[in-house]
Amino acid sequence: MTDSVDLSRVHLIGIGGSGMSGVARILLDRGAVVTGSDVKDSRPVRALRSAGALVAVGHEAENLRLAGEPPTVVVVSFAAIPQDNPELTAARELAIPVIRRSDLLGELMSGRRQVLFAGTHGKTSTTSMAVAAMQAAGMDPSFAIGGQLNRSGTNAHHGTGDSFVAEADESDASLLRYCPDIAVVTNIEPDHLDFFGTAEAYHRVFDDFAGRLTPSGHLVVCLDDVHAAELGERCLERGVNVLGYGTTAAAALHPSIPVGAEVLSSDVTDEGSVAHVRIGDRDLTVHLQIPGQHMVLNGAGALLAGHLAGGDPVLLAEGLSDFNGVRRRFEYRGTVGGVRVYDDYAHHPTEVTAVLQAARQKVGAEGTGARVIVVFQPHLYSRTIEFAAEFATALSLADAAVVLDIFGAREKPVEGVSSRIIIDSMTAEQVVYEPDFSQAPETVRRLVEEGDLVLTMGAGNVTLLAGEILATLGE
């Protein structure tokens, strides 16, 4: 955490990003003068302008004076913005403090009960579930999440309640800038090794995160994930308040960890999932509108966090049953000619596996014999090389797969490496390598049959294809 900074005039470089736009929205709600810039115009940028922010398209030094006076602080995501960015350079020359987005979020959370969600997978979904549940329980938390809630269409809110709910991102160790009162760890699986270097270093950051809990705080771990449960056991030995959530079978494997939320049973239906969860002496039934056992576990973690923050379990469960998802998490995009199209952010083999299993369970519950077709875009060359075999296994859960070229994002292409290193090991019934992004909708059209479920999947621009596929099917 940085020393307290003046947040009266804040300039955000990359203001249209999912994380930046959220904190910008909260700053506006708190009366700050907000300026910013991004490489392109976008829906989040336009929404921020409507809310009162001054946003320039393109990065120029003069953008620091969009509001006349220079800002009191400049906020940047060091992972996404190069050090020679002209606005960053100008800020240094003017001796304007430059802080990270995580520092700003820590400042915004100051004075509130910090309810933070960490883990390799499921942070956005679980955080969003907790927000929906706590809102239904009348708690009106402030929140900042990495995706837009489908119902409200926003990714952040300045609430009147005493809790602040947020994701704690481990990808660059920024979660170590917070002091949580309630810290939920959904799972731990080595990732972002381009930053951490080793799996051991990646695991260690979660131990360090737990070490930042307030003295009376609680660590909440998913018992169905062996590494999260082991973290809980290590923290118990250090005297940390630890509670677990998960299935009855998982709880039995870790008897030293007190169970805060026990999933007694769950089933996938054609409309989502239904779960029976015990919190304390209350047995609750939750109807989730999103399928998958991973979502059942996420829901249990969200309920327990909301309960620890003071929410009534019955009202929390009602709110969770009313939760209709977050953008790009098994997000329904439309149906044309009997073909349903969904979009998902999954970009790690474990996430791909969980989403495809949920899709198969959904069509299985429908009993129509529909197929699951995935359009997958690998994200980052380093991740694709590291997990090529695992991606092949995961994608083979689909009946047919269209694999696009690698979305490099911040990485430069690696000579000789393409998505072929994945498809060479795949066993799906039909596998198509489609290097031409613009041809992907037509490729899908040739594959699908009435009743099929199509999933566009990945962390890059593959999300743009969902609408294009629907349009192509409509032709």
Image (cartoon, grey):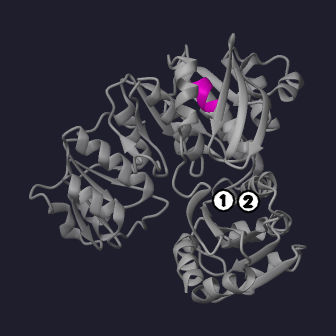
**Residue with the most extreme left position:** 68
x 59%, y 46%: residue: 170
The circle drawn on residue 352 is 2
Neighbourhood count class around disc 2 (C-alpha, 10 Å): few under 14, some 14–19, many 20 upward: many
Q: Name the residue beneath numbered marker 1.
A: 346
Q: CA distance from mark 2 to mark 1?
A: 5 Å
User: Is 250 in front, or is 34?
Assistant: 250
**Labels 2 and 1 touching (C-beta < 8 A):** yes
x 47%, y 33%: residue: 165
**Residue with the most extreme top position:** 281
How many numbered callouts? 2
Neighbourhood count class around disc 1 (C-alpha, 10 Å): few under 14, some 14–19, many 20 upward: many
How far across and how far down the image is residue 317, in percent? 58, 27
* Mark earlier in primary sequence (2, 1): 1
How far across and how far down the image is residue 106, in percent? 41, 36
- Report the magenta stretch's main SS: helix
